Amino acid sequence: MSKYYHITTYGCQMNVHESEKIAGILSGLGYESCENAEDADIVVFNTCCIRENAENHAFGNIGMLKKLKARKKDMIIAVGGCLTQQIGKADVLHSKFPYVDIIFGTHNLGKLKDYILKKQTRKKAVIEIEEDCGAVCEGIEPLRTSYPNAWLNITYGCNNFCTYCIVPYVRGRERSRRSEDIIKEAKYLVSLGYKEITLLGQNVNSYANGTDDISFPELLKKIAAIDGKFRIRFMTSHPKDFSEELAKVIGEERKICNLVHLPVQSGSDKILKAMNRKYTVSEYMDKIGTLRKYIPDCAVTTDIIVGFPGETEEDFLQTCELVKTAEYSSAFTFVYSRRDGTVASKMEGQIPEEVSKDRIMRLIEIVNAQTRGQSSEYVGKIVEILCEGYDEKRKLYFGRDESGKMAYFSGTADMFGEFVNVKIGLANGVSLFGEVING
Ligand code: 5AD
Ligand code: SF4
C-alpha cells in the first residue's frame, strides 16, 4: 500500500530547497507526495522565524492538525526549520502541541530518517535540537520541485549579526561547502537538463572566507565553464562584501544572469549603523556604480526594512530617496519584526505598528511605480525567456528573462524548460505579455 507525505514550507528559497531535501529523505523511505495533509501518513512543517508573522502562521497551521491527528493516530507530524532552533521553542512547541511526534532543529536535517524510524517504534515524541557544530550537510539527494531551475547551496549560516536578524542564532556560523562538491553537483544538474542553477547562501560573497578554497567569483567562473546552455543566478549578496572582481565576472560570463540581489535595508546612515550593516549609503551606491560600470543594464533588486527602532520620518524619507536613485527592478519590503534574542529587540525607540504600516504602504507605492515604469520600457523588445510552466488561469505559458522579469505568451508543451525568444507587446503592472518569435 502506498504511503504519502505532505510538506508545508515557510520562508525563503533556502527553506524551499531544504524541503526538497526533506522530500528526498521521505521518498527514500518509500513515501510519495500528496496535495493535502488529510491524505498524508507523514506531515512535515518546515518552519521559518525570520519575522513574527511567519512564526505565527506555522503555529496556526500546526494547531489546525489537532483534530486530524485525533482521527488518524498513526499519522506522523514532524516540525523542523528555524523556529524549532530558537532557545526554548522546542519545549513551547511540545507543550502547546503534544500530538507533534518529531521536533528537529536546523542542524539535524541529516538525521530525519533516523527520527522517523525511531518514532515508529515508540510512543514518546522524538525531540532533537543540536547546537551548531559547524557541519556541512552533504549526501542528501533532494527531490527537486522547481524544474527548470535547481537550487544549490554553497554556504550555510551567517556571521554578520545584523542587529534585527535571528538567522545567525538559528542557522549557526557561516560555513561553506567545498567547491569540488558544488561543481560536481552543478555538472550533474546540467546533465539532468536543468537550465537554471541558483546558488544559495545568506552571504554568497563571503564564500570560503578564511579557508584555502577558491573565492566566490572563481567559483562562478568554474560553474560557468560547464558545457551546455544554462543560466546561473545567486543570492544573497551582502553589499559590504560585494567586490569589483565579482562585478567583472558577472559582466564577462554570459551564463551569469545580469541580476544582483543587493539588500540595502535602509537609506539612512544612522539606521544602517544601528543595524550593524557595515556600509554607508554612499558606499552602497558606489557598489551599484561599479556593477553598472561593467554591466550597464544590470538589474538590481533589494530588501528594505521599515520601522527599525529609532527610524524617524526623516530616516524613512532617505530610504524613499535611495529607492528612487538606485533604480531597483524590484524590492522586497518588510515591516521590522522584533525577534527575541537579537540586539535590536532591546533597543529604545521601537516604532508603533501604525507608523510602520503607513511607511511601508508609501514605500510600496514608490517601488511599484518604478517597476511599472521599467516594465513599460520592455514593450517592443525581444527577450530570451526560460519557459517555467503553464498558467491555467491565463491559458498562457510563462517564464522569466535573465533579469527576473516574468513574461506570458501562448506556446506549446514542448517549450516547457526551453529558452524561447518572446517579443513583448504589452506591459501590465509587473507582468509582460508577448509572442514567441522562434520555436
Ligand atoms: N524584521 C523584518 N525583516 C527582517 N529581515 C530579516 N530580519 C528581519 C526582521 N527582524 C529581512 C531582511 C532580509 C530579509 C531576508 O528579511 O530584509 O534581507
Ligand atoms: Fe541576517 Fe544580516 Fe546574516 Fe542576512 S547578513 S542573514 S540579514 S544577519
Image (cartoon, rainbow, N blue to C red):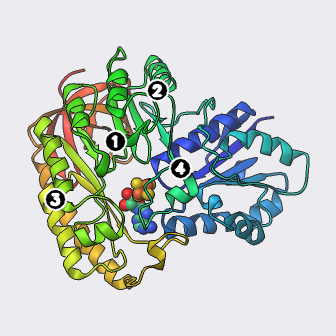
Q: Position of residue 11 (x, y in %)?
A: 49, 55
Q: Which residue in the protein does label 1 denote?
A: 395
Amino acid type assigned to the residue bearing label 2 in the image: Ser
- The dot on residue 179 is 2
Q: Residue sitting at 61 percent across and 29 percent down? A: 141
Instruction: Out of 220 and 50, give the one closest to the viewer.
Output: 220
Q: Position of residue 254 (x, y in %)?
A: 23, 25
Q: Position of residue 346 (x, y in %)?
A: 48, 79
First along the sequence among labels 2 and 3: 2
Q: Nearer the viewer, mark 1 or mark 4?
A: 4
Check the image and report above or below for 394 versus 305: above
Mark 2–mark 1 distance (CA, rounded to whole Å): 42 Å
Q: Are marks 2 and 3 in contact (CB under 8 Å)?
A: no
| Residue reaching furthest to the right | 122
Q: Quadrant of residue 234?
A: top left
Mark 1–mark 3 distance (CA, rounded to whole Å): 46 Å
Q: Residue sitting at 50 percent across and 69 percent down? A: 342
Amino acid type assigned to the residue bearing label 3 in the image: Ser
